[in-house]
Image: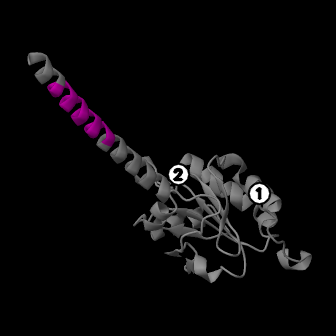
Amino acid sequence: MLKTVRTGTTSVLKRLINKNLQLLLLAVATLLWAHGASALEVGDKAPDFKLQASDGQAYSLADFVGSKPVVLAFFPSAFTGGCTIQCKALRDSGREIKSFDVAYFMASVNPLEENTAFAKEYELDFPILSNPEKDVIEAYGVLGRGGFANRWTYYIDSNGIVVKIDKETNPATAGTDLTRNMEVLGFPRLPQSASR
């Protein structure tokens, strides 16, 4: 009789442990799926945005869908070493970048005033989008540690589909890398006279 009680108790304990283990695994799987589901990937529709820029304009992805590709280069913060190098690299490659029929932007969590001052100080010839609310940065999955954007570049085709995500953006070669990536992706070029 004692052996039957122990066996019965053991089997009840095993079932409880198995049930709790199953629930734990289900919870972990759900968390992993939810995290993975929110990560933007190549082939996904790019989230729309409407942000103020350093040139005094507001830009929306919807403004360009159906007409031209968009390049959106996120960077952590204005007036920091790597970000200054990256922005200057895009500025220095401006002629080559502007030979493509694309809209290109850099974006950070900095307030508009700070990005405007940054663009002016370094004579940047492209708009820097400001997203201090971080909603767009979160929608693109680039929010990193400390509440700053990761240094990732998104290439979005004229249909609004993400065709490349560069998560290894090198600040020093960002301009030439951007030009090379647009060439490889087959982004359209402007006629020779229009790009000058």
Going by the picture, which residue comes out furthest to the right?
192
Going by the picture, which residue comes out furthest to the left?
1
**Residue depicted at 77% across the width and 65% down the height:** 97
Which residue is labeled 1 in the image? 181
Q: Secondary structure at mark 2?
A: loop
**What secondary structure is the stretch in magenta mostly built from?**
helix
Which residue is labeled 2 in the image? 150
Q: Position of residue 159 (x, y in %)?
A: 68, 75
Q: Quadrant of the C terminus?
A: bottom right
Q: CA distance from mark 1 to mark 2?
A: 19 Å
Q: In this picture, which residue range is highlighted in magenta?
A: 8-22
**Residue depicted at 36% across the width and 46% down the height:** 26
Residue 90 image label:
none
Q: Is residue 16 magenta?
A: yes
Q: Secondary structure at mark 1?
A: helix
Q: Quadrant of the N terminus?
A: top left
Would you place residue 7 above or below residue 76 in this image? above
Front residue (pair 63, 125): 63
Crowd rating for badge 1 (residues with CA inside 10 Å; few <14, some 14–19, many 20+): some
Would you place residue 159 above or below residue 166 in this image? below
Q: Is residue 85 magenta?
A: no
Q: Give amino acid for label 1.
A: Asn
Q: Give amino acid for label 2.
A: Asn
Going from the N terminus, do you reach mark 1 or mark 2 first? 2
Q: Position of residue 104 (x, y in %)?
A: 67, 69
Instruction: Say whether residue 178 is left or right of residue 194.
Output: left
Which image quadrant for residue 156?
A: bottom right
Q: Position of residue 140 (x, y in %)?
A: 52, 62
**Residue depicted at 40% across the width and 53% down the height:** 147
**Residue depicted at 79% across the width and 68% down the height:** 187
